[in-house]
Image (cartoon, helix red, strand yellow):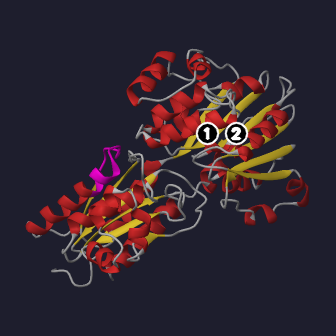
Amino acid sequence: MAQREQAEEIIRAVLTASDPAHAVSRAVAALPPCNGRTLLLAVGKAAPVMAAAALAVPGFAPERTLVITKYGHCRTAGVSQLPEGRQSSFRILEAGHPVPDANSYAAADEAVAMLSGLAPADRVVLLLSGGGSALLEKPLLPEEEMGEINRQLLACGAPIEEVNTIRKRLSAVKGGRLAQLCAPAQIHTIALSDVLGDAPHSIASGPAVPDPTTCADALRIVRERGLRLSPEARALLARETPKKLLNAQVQVVGGMSIARRAAARACAALGCRTLLFLPALTAEASAVGRFFGCLARKARREGRRLALAAGGETVVTLGKAHGLGGRNQEAALAAATVLAGMTDACFFSLGTDGTDGPTDAAGGYADGKTARAIAAAGHTTAREALRAHDAYPALQSCGGLLHTGPTGTNVNDVCCLLVGTGDGCDR
């Protein structure tokens, strides 16, 4: 089997293992009985799949269901198979990601209206997945200003923890504030994690969990990242988020570790030595790609056949001018510059949600022929495209983009290095 085929087989195994439907079904079935009304709110890139799984649980019949997801991630096949009564109370909205848009704000308004006026005997079931921070937004600032702050946060290379620390204080629904809006009703969060360490307060900016970050943390991030904020925004950063919520419970039912282990199992099936890279990847995407390329060269010098599986969330620090791509594509392009000329070695990096940055690709694939193929296309070289943060067209020119379409899950990124596993390798 060629290494590209091996990579695609590993990707299929990762996405199958990361499907949240079974975990959500178990969690919903285990919820305590409710004496009042039940409302279901699902937010995130995996929201349609999670909601359909919940509604299929016998005996779980919410009065209303609102699903908020990213454009193109609306999967209704599972909904069409539900009983007629449940379909009629099921509403799906699509909104902007990674930068909130008018539909994100409208979706939040509809969610807040649905959750208003609840009684102590009522409950809200919140199905939460990655992307929810942008998809559900009720800003405390003018929408234009909020959009500009989000763009600054995404461009400065800040890790998601820092991004969320700022977002929480500028929103009426993040950092535990959605739970406050539900009071006196209880809110049960069932979350699919796309953050390192699976901390509930970081998943979609923790709308229904206490927030451990502080105002001092927020102001430090503004200073260190050089964010340009209005006096009104700075004043909001000085307002503390909820530190205790008596009406909120949370359960995390899946995360990156599941996807990473699935990748390792699929690699091991290739019959070579398989290593699981346990530290979560958090560095610059280009540095990660070059690192794995260097590992491939070292393995080849030592005559070793190996596969290495890893996961995490890298960052890309953009300059004033940049092209099109995403962190996974950038990692693959950087690996291509190191793998150049090698035989039987490849690297791929994939966003498990099926999208990477503002593109239609899930990630990128590179081997020893990638850099030469990009140069042969005549528009740029791999190194030039990397400097310009323009990975998408470079990889597109040589068939190096990975396309899965929306996957129905979102457990962060997975990458793999394969050395000596292809058909032409030395056994």
Decide: few, some or many residues near mark 1? Use Cα within 10 Å; few <14, some 14-19, many ≥20.
Answer: some
Identity, as a three-letter code, of the amino acid under mark 2: Leu
Range covered by the magenta-colored residues: 277-289
The quarter of the picture where residue 251 lies is top right
> For the residue labelled by badge 1, is the local secondary structure a helix, a strand or a loop?
helix
Image coordinates of residue 210 in percent, x first then y, are 59, 23
In the image, residue 71 sits, relative to residue 281, either above or below, namely below
Marks 1 and 2: CB-CB under 8 Å?
A: no
- Would residue 418 appear left or right of 228 to someone viewing this image? left
Image coordinates of residue 72 in percent, x first then y, are 66, 61
Between discs 1 and 2, the one toward the N terminus: 2
| Count of residue discs | 2
Q: Quadrant of the C terminus?
A: bottom left
- Would residue 314 appear left or right of 179 to someone viewing this image? left
Asked whether residue 329 is drawn in magenta, I would say no
- Would residue 341 appear left or right of 108 to someone viewing this image? left
In the image, residue 271 sits, relative to residue 54, either above or below, namely below
- Would residue 343 appear left or right of 417 to someone viewing this image? left
Image coordinates of residue 77 in percent, x first then y, are 74, 66
How many angstroms separate mark 1 from mark 2 (CA)? 25 Å
Q: Which mark is residue 126?
A: 2
In the image, residue 299 sits, relative to residue 166, either above or below, namely below
For the point 79% across and 46% down, the residue is: 66
Q: Which mark is residue 147?
A: 1
Identity, as a three-letter code, of the amino acid under mark 1: Gly
Asked whether residue 287 is drawn in magenta, I would say yes
For the point 62% across and 34% down, the residue is: 146
Q: Is residue 203 visible?
A: yes
- From the viewer's side, name the closer residue of 423 and 69: 69
In the image, residue 313 sits, relative to residue 73, either above or below, namely above
Image coordinates of residue 47 in percent, x first then y, are 67, 51
Q: Which mark is residue 243?
A: none
